[in-house]
Image (cartoon, grey):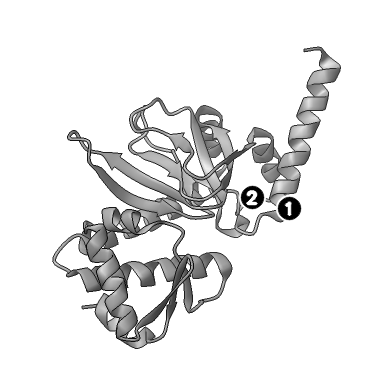
Amino acid sequence: MDQATATVHRDSASCECSEMCRLCETRALSVCGPLEGNEFLSLQRLNHPVSFAARAVLFNQETPVRHVYSLVHGVVRLYKLLPDGRRQIVGFALPGDFLGLALADGYGFCADAVTAVSACRFSRDHFAEFAEHHPNVLRRLHDMATHELALAQQQMVLLGRRDAEEKIASFLLGLQQRWARISGRVSVTIDLPMGRQDIADFLGLTIETVSRTLNRMARDRLLVIVPDGVRVLDAAKLENLASA
């Protein structure tokens, strides 16, 4: 590739990044949120925008960590494969979440797209070097790690002594809060892009139990099941179940 062609490719990539950043609705929550001016442009030069179709793999458990990702659109399923081949879903990444930065050389879990996904992808080494020289990014990563720890602690409680109805109520309200954090408003309709099998694997239930419990909640007028989600009818009762 000659110098002129290389310049065209770099300019094209730069334009794609700029357009992606201009349209990004989650920048305030993302790792780049604290950056302005030249600092932001410096990080933008390291960015390689990527897209994944639904069910496409972002990375696999224990494969070498070469890239980190800042999720822009879509939902990503995070799961660990157990030695006996079973799957334990450990979380769902939403827009604004950051994936892949860990001390280990290999990814600690698998990640694949639940819906179509777009993300900012960075070389792990280049991003780590950038973060070392930009305290604002380090603080944002610390905040993100604290948020992930809080979600992990909630998951431990979910998998503990709660019954199926309490687990599902807590899951729905937790997801509602996360969507509200992204959109800036609380909606009575909770998007559920993940399937019931995914919800079951996340909550340590069977798919039959998840379906039966959601249907019972609908009969009891706690919620209405709508395409790709649920609409909350009785928020107070749902909150009581979640806090039991």
Residue 211 position by quadrant = bottom left
| Kind of residue indicated by mark 1 | Arg
Q: Position of residue 147 (x, y in %)?
A: 39, 58
The secondary structure type at the circle numbered 2 is: loop
Q: Quadrant of the C terminus?
A: bottom left
Q: Provide residue 131's location: percent of width, then percent of height.
A: 53, 39
Q: In the rendering, which numbered label is found on residue 22?
A: 1
Distance from label 2 to label 1 (Cα)?
14 Å
Q: Determine whether 195 is above or below 214 in the image.
A: above
Residue 150 at x, y = what percent?
Answer: 33, 60
Q: Is residue 33 placed above or below 81 in the rendered structure?
A: below
Residue 149 can be seen, yes or no? no
Disc 1 on helix, strand or loop?
helix
- Which residue in the structure is indicated by mark 2? 35
- Say which residue appears at 68% left-offset and 40% top-offset: 44
Residue 189 location (% of width, % of height): 49, 75
Residue at figure coordinates x 22%, y 41% from the top left: 86
For residue 179, say whether it is visible. Answer: yes
User: Is residue 93 rendered to the left or right of residue 51?
Assistant: left
Q: Earlier in the sequence, mark 2 or mark 1?
A: 1
- What numbered label is drawn on residue 3? none
Looking at the picture, which amino acid does disc 2 mark?
Answer: Leu
